[in-house]
Image (spheres, rainbow, N blue to C red):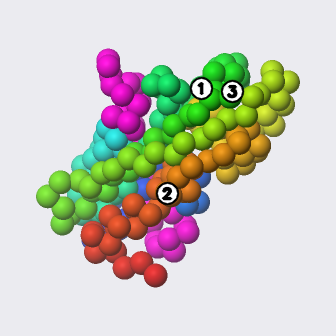
């Protein structure tokens, strides 16, 4: 790959949902998938994991494109302190959804921006509280058959059919539940010198 031009903005994510959210800001950007091990470290809290992964993803791409503004993000689902990652299979998705049934689940969305003018990367974690309905096995089965959630933290896509699984969502930034907190991102990009509408 060729080196980036000054002013290039790169989203360090393969998620189509994050790309969709980025388009809301009406800025030109490119996206690339960072190769990062998402395994939690021993004793790592869900919030610490979300923050570390966002920073690691941004920094790994920024090393390849040091003149670019790089955005890293990751999301971790947290059920009573237990980390729920991406299920990988439908069977694991069903198990995760049974675990979340009737529970308040925290979705921690880590965000990091690396930019040439920053001494250190800017990073934050936005947390969304999601209260799940009591879900029957039949409801879980229908949902998992209708929506591919194998690569989604906690097996829920609130931007799709997953919204039917919850009673309430509490957040200061609704975009954080999809995995890219746009309110915090706007602040970070402005600090990096990006003019937003």
Indicate yes or no whether the magenta region holds residue 33: yes
Q: What element carries label 3?
A: loop
Indicate yes or no whether the magenta region holds residue 8: no
Disc 1/disc 2 C-alpha distance (Å): 27 Å
Q: Which residue lies furthest to the left in this view?
A: 119
Residue density around tag 3, few if under 14, some if 14–19, many if 20 or more, within 10 Å: some
Residue 23: x percent and y percent?
55, 67
Q: Give the range drawn in magenta.
A: 22-50
The residue positioned 56% from the left and 34% from the top of the image is: 105
N-terminal label among 3 and 1? 1
Q: Is the magenta stretch mostly helix, strand or loop?
A: loop
Residue identified by numbered label 1: 87
Q: Which numbered mark, 3 or 1, is in the foreground of this view?
A: 3
- Horizontally, is 131 left or right of 58 in the view? right
N-terminal label among 3 and 2? 3
Quadrant position of the N terminus in the picture: bottom left
The answer to whether residue 34 is above or below residue 101 is: below
Residue density around tag 2, few if under 14, some if 14–19, many if 20 or more, within 10 Å: few
Q: Give the mark count.
A: 3
Q: Which numbered mark, 1 or 2, is in the foreground of this view?
A: 2
Residue identified by numbered label 3: 101
Q: In which quarter of the image is residue 165?
A: top right
Q: Is residue 37 visible?
A: no
The answer to whether residue 67 is above or below residue 107 is: below
Q: Is mark 2 on a helix, strand or loop?
A: loop
Residue identified by numbered label 2: 172
């Amino acid at each position: 790959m060729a080196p980036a031009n000054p002013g290039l903005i790169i989203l360090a994510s393969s998620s189509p949902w994050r790309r969709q959210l980025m388009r809301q800001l009406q800025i030109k950007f490119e996206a690339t998938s960072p190769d990062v091990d998402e395994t939690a470290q021993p004793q790592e809290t869900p919030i610490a994991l979300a923050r570390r992964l966002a920073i690691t993803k941004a920094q790994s791409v920024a090393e390849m494109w040091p003149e670019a503004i790089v955005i890293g993000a990751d999301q971790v689902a947290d059920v009573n302190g237990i980390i729920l990652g991406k299920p990988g299979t439908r069977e694991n998705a069903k198990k995760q959804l049974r675990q979340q049934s009737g529970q308040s689940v925290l979705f921690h969305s880590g965000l990091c921006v690396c930019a040439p003018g920053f001494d250190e990367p800017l990073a934050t974690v936005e947390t969304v509280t999601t209260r799940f309905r009591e879900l029957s096995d039949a409801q879980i089965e229908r949902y998992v058959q209708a929506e591919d959630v194998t690569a989604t933290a906690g097996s829920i896509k609130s931007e799709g059919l997953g919204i039917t699984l919850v009673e309430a969502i509490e957040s200061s930034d609704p975009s954080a539940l999809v995995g890219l907190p746009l309110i915090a991102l706007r602040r970070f990009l402005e600090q990096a010198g990006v003019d937003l509408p």
